Image (cartoon, grey):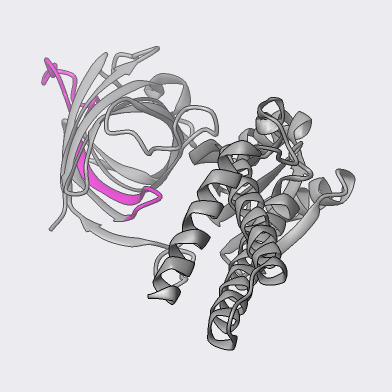
């Protein structure tokens, strides 16, 4: 019965004293000082080696505190702390390196938690003081004294844990002007197998109109239309074209007019740094080239032989998903032979490719 009364006394003294003494180490005005800031940036670059060097130089120039660093042939991740006032410089670096797929910034205020911890510690210290006074002033038997001492020891253990948590928060927030940045740099043409080329199997069809700049009687028509197969074999957009151009409104009485052009070409497209890097589903801008040649056949069925050909391209992907690509482009059709003057012109094409 005495032990029960003793425990009731401890409980009452704990709550009564705590309510009468709200002294804490930090006031409400200090809450904003205890905050953590984190930033995550993920960037894909077409020049990974150069990008890694620029990131290293940035870390050196700003004297950052590096917590973690991991670099492979295709990825570079570094976690560092930097002054909040330099976050704009971090964003600027990311935009220069390539296309950012993630750029997030978060803050967490720990002020309320640290004040609550201080209040708990204060209440337990007051309670320990009250119990210690009871030990000294009361006539208690050894069993009762042992109960009170155990209570003080338990309180001290909890106080120790609370102070450890306070120190942990304080160490992370005492330099609250710093932000922890997780910067991830990737080679944009990588695969899960760490190959530098991401192969796909996307056959398709292409339809073209070729407008000749300076058509010549006995050599070229003013307009050709073409149809062919476009086989895309890398995700970075490398492909082969195989098709034929035919003269529109062919003047068959002109026996030397070029009627057909059977062409084969290899092409590559490149996404610009500041226009989405081909990551959007709609309206991805790109530039590129095609190189190859064609065999021209005249109305009299005489062939001109193989003529080298280059196309300089600018295009827009109309729609893009994992399984389908609808594309359109304009290019400059440039034969590399004596046919150049009267057979070069503007080519417009539309294509459809799909995963096979």
- Magenta segment: 234-259
40 in the magenta segment: no
Vertical relation: 118 (above or below) 346: below
The image quarter containing residue 95 is top right
Foreground of the two, 339 or 314 = 314
Please give the name of the residue rendered at 77% of the width and 45% of the height, measured from the top-left corner.
Answer: 174
Question: Residue 341, percent across and down?
Answer: 47, 21
Foreground of the two, 240 or 213 = 240
Q: Is residue 165 left or right of residue 347?
A: right
Please give the name of the residue rendered at 11% of the width and 21% of the height, measured from the top-left corner.
Answer: 252
Question: Residue 255, percent across and down?
Answer: 18, 25
Foreground of the two, 249 or 280 = 280
Please give the name of the residue rendered at 30% of the width and 51% of the height, measured from the top-left corner.
Answer: 240
Q: Is residue 195 left or right of residue 202?
A: right
Counting every numbered tag in the picture gives 0
Vertical relation: 237 (above or below) 85: below
Q: Is residue 122 left or right of residue 218?
A: right
| Residue 219 appears in the rendering | no
Foreground of the two, 215 or 119 = 119
Q: Residue furthest bottom?
A: 142
| Residue 43 appears in the rendering | yes
Please give the name of the residue rendered at 46% of the width and 70% of the height, measured from the top-left corner.
Answer: 195
Question: Residue 1, percent across and down?
Answer: 37, 75
């Amino acid at each position: 019965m005495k032990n029960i009364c003793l425990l009731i006394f401890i409980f009452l003294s704990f709550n009564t004293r705590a309510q009468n003494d709200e002294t804490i180490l930090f006031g409400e005005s200090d809450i904003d000082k205890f905050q953590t800031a984190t930033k995550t940036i993920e960037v894909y670059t077409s020049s990974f080696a150069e990008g890694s060097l620029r990131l290293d130089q940035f870390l050196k120039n700003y004297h950052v505190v590096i917590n973690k660093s991991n670099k492979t042939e295709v990825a570079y991740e570094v976690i560092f702390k930097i002054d909040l006032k330099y976050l704009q410089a971090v964003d600027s670096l990311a935009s220069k390196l390539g296309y950012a797929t993630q750029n997030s910034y978060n803050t967490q205020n720990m002020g309320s938690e640290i004040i609550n911890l201080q209040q708990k510690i204060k209440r337990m210290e007051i309670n320990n003081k009250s119990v210690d006074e009871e030990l000294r002033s009361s006539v208690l038997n050894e069993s009762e004294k042992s109960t009170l001492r155990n209570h003080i020891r338990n309180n001290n253990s909890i106080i120790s844990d609370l102070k450890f948590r306070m120190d942990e928060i304080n160490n992370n927030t005492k330099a609250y002007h710093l932000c922890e940045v997780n910067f991830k740099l990737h080679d944009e043409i990588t695969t899960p197998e760490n190959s530098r080329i991401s192969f796909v199997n996307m056959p398709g069809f292409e339809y073209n109109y070729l407008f000749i700049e300076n058509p010549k009687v006995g050599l070229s028509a003013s307009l050709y239309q073409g149809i062919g197969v476009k086989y895309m074999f890398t995700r970075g957009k490398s492909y082969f074209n195989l098709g034929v151009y035919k003269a529109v409104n062919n003047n068959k009485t002109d026996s030397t007019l070029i009627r057909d052009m059977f062409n084969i070409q290899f092409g590559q497209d490149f996404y610009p740094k500041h226009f989405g890097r081909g990551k959007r589903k709609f309206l991805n801008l790109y530039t590129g080239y095609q190189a190859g040649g064609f065999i021209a056949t005249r109305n009299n069925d005489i062939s001109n032989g193989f003529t080298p050909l280059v196309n300089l391209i600018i295009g827009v992907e109309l729609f893009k998903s994992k399984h389908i690509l609808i594309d359109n482009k304009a290019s400059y059709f440039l034969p590399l032979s004596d046919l150049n003057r009267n057979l070069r012109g503007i080519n417009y094409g539309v294509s459809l490719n799909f995963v096979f």
